[in-house]
Image (tube, rainbow, N blue to C red):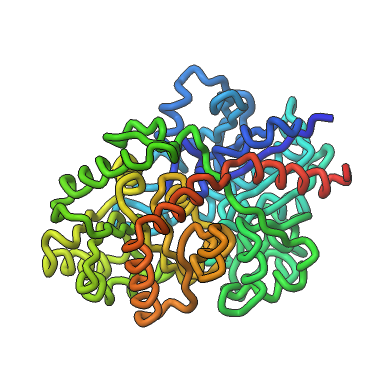
């Protein structure tokens, strides 16, 4: 029997993307189709989305009063799969990014914008929108997490779908002032510690975690880590209380987008059989970033420059890396102080360190395809996609042993090297000393080019496509629905 799933999210590749969430949401319909699961995606009508679907996208439903506003539902396609878009210009048609304005400040009405997204999802999943019937609602992150709460406390008139919440990063929880509670249309009993109340505020993610039929994270290790205080961000007690409903499924990557064999961003596409061709991409990185041309390894960072990503510690050891003979290219944006610190390091080390503040998708592909190693010293990492892209491109990951990084990278320890299975390097505890130690270890491995090539080949041969992840999601869906 074909299952019908409504995936509710604040972004979806290729229509709108600020991070890995969009990649996951965009990939799910195709990943689940072989398992007889039809996924419809519901997202907000940001200007980019509205331009993509066009003015001719039909209006299929009208809400005259949804969380105090007016909205239309439009239907279109994302690839070969159904897309639903909330057309409400007063909420979505504005300059800036999906969650913040041009100055980086949260939109003042985010509480309403994402309550509307969740309410629309709940209406679609419980018979309030004629012509739509879903077996399961899959809500992603805090922006959609009120949807299971609406299904639980204020369902529509028809069959109520089962619900799943996926935590892409528990650090982002969507907490808003209590005075907005009456505007949500939830019954009084929802305002409790067992409902949507969270330390005197409305907790969007907390509400979803409390009311959903199942909870997933984007890696098995992260699903265990968030039971603990240092990772649970205040929600560890709730996670522990619902432990039997919590599981982790590693994200996949789309080989149609991330393939060094057919990547237009690479001057020299290559395969595992033509790995020597990769050197032309390394030369291109040197030229593009003004690095010295030599045989030393180029390390790269493609990341948000934030505390979570360990960038405050990494910037402290740049001088050590250069002293070892390494070079570094940084592509990212984030904490202004860290942006300045990285830029200052580049000024200290011309030809050895280069920094580009911002994000550029083709440049990120070039760095993956031309740099020798990628450094990911995250303090916590729910899954991470950057290390998966690196594996596919022969760019050896050097990662902290946490979350999805621990699940996806096999450390080049003595046993893994002896058996020929290593795919990267891991280290424990994000400290300057530990990062310096793993960088030294990386330099030693790089000096043995036969060993280095084996690590590259292992990574390129690893299968982190959505084939496996899709199967695990399909099994979870059917389990929640009682089909197994």
Q: Nearer the viewer, residue 370 or 379?
A: 370
Instruction: Please say whether residue 419 is visible from this viewpoint.
Output: yes
> Measured along the vertical axis of the image, is residue 82 above or below residue 97?
above
Q: x and y percent of residue 244 in the render? A: 80, 65
Instruction: Please say whether residue 109 is visible from this viewpoint.
Output: no
Q: x and y percent of residue 370 in the render? A: 30, 47
Q: Quadrant of the N terminus?
A: top right
Residue for point 88% across, 42% down: 483
Residue for point 75% across, 49% down: 163
> Measured along the vertical axis of the image, is residue 35 above or below residue 409?
above
Residue for point 78% across, 55% down: 213
Residue for point 59% across, 69% down: 201
Q: Quadrant of the C terminus?
A: top right
Q: x and y percent of residue 208 in the render? A: 68, 58
Residue 317's quadrant in the figure? bottom left
Q: Nearer the viewer, residue 112 or 346?
A: 346
Left/right of residue 6 with respect to residue 342 in the rendered view: right
Left/right of residue 165 with respect to residue 83 in the rendered view: right
Q: Nearer the viewer, residue 206 or 320?
A: 320
> Measured along the vertical axis of the image, is residue 264 above or below residue 153?
above
Q: Nearer the viewer, residue 232 or 148?
A: 232
């Amino acid at each position: 029997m074909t299952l019908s799933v409504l995936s509710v999210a604040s972004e979806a590749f290729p229509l709108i993307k600020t991070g890995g969430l969009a990649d996951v949401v965009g990939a799910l319909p195709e990943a689940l189709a072989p398992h007889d699961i039809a996924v419809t995606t519901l997202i907000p009508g940001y200007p980019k989305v509205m331009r993509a679907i066009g003015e001719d996208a039909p209006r299929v439903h009208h809400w005259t009063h949804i969380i105090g506003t007016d909205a239309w539902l439009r239907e279109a396609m994302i690839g070969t799969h159904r897309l639903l878009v909330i057309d409400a210009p007063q909420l979505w048609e504005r300059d800036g990014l999906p969650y913040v304005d041009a100055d980086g400040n949260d939109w003042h009405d985010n509480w309403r914008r994402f309550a509307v997204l969740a309410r629309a999802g709940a209406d679609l999943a419980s018979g309030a929108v004629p012509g739509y019937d879903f077996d399961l609602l899959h809500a992603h992150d805090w922006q959609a997490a009120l949807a299971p709460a609406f299904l639980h406390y204020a369902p529509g008139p028809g069959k109520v779908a089962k619900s799943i919440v996926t935590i892409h990063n528990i650090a982002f929880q969507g907490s808003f002032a209590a005075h907005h509670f009456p505007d949500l249309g939830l019954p009084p009993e929802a305002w409790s510690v067992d409902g949507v109340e969270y330390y005197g505020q409305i907790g969007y993610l907390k509400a979803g975690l409390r009311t959903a039929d199942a909870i997933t994270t984007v890696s098995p290790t992260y699903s265990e880590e968030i039971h603990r205080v240092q990772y649970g961000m205040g929600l560890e007690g709730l996670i522990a209380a619902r432990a039997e409903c919590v599981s982790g499924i590693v994200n996949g990557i789309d080989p149609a987008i991330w393939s060094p064999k057919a990547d237009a961003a690479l001057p020299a596409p290559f395969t595992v059989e033509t790995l020597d061709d990769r050197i032309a991409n390394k030369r291109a990185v040197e030229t593009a970033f003004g690095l010295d041309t030599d045989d030393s390894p180029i390390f790269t960072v493609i990341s948000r420059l934030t505390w979570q990503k360990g960038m405050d510690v990494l910037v402290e050891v740049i001088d050590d890396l250069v002293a070892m003979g390494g070079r570094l290219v940084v592509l990212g944006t984030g904490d202004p102080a860290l942006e300045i610190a990285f830029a200052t390091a580049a000024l200290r080390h011309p030809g050895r360190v280069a920094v580009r503040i911002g994000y550029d998708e083709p440049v990120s592909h070039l760095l993956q395809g031309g740099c020798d190693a990628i450094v990911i010293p995250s303090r916590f990492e729910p899954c991470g996609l950057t290390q998966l892209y690196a594996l596919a491109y022969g760019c050896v990951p050097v990662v902290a042993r946490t979350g999805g990084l621990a699940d996806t990278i096999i450390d080049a320890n003595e046993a893994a090297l002896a058996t020929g299975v290593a795919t990267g390097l891991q280290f424990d505890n994000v400290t300057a000393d530990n990062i310096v130690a793993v960088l030294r270890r990386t330099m030693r491995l790089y000096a043995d080019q036969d060993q280095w090539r084996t690590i590259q080949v292992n990574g390129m041969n690893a299968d982190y496509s959505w084939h496996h992840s899709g199967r695990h999601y399909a099994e979870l869906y059917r389990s929640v629905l009682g089909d197994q």
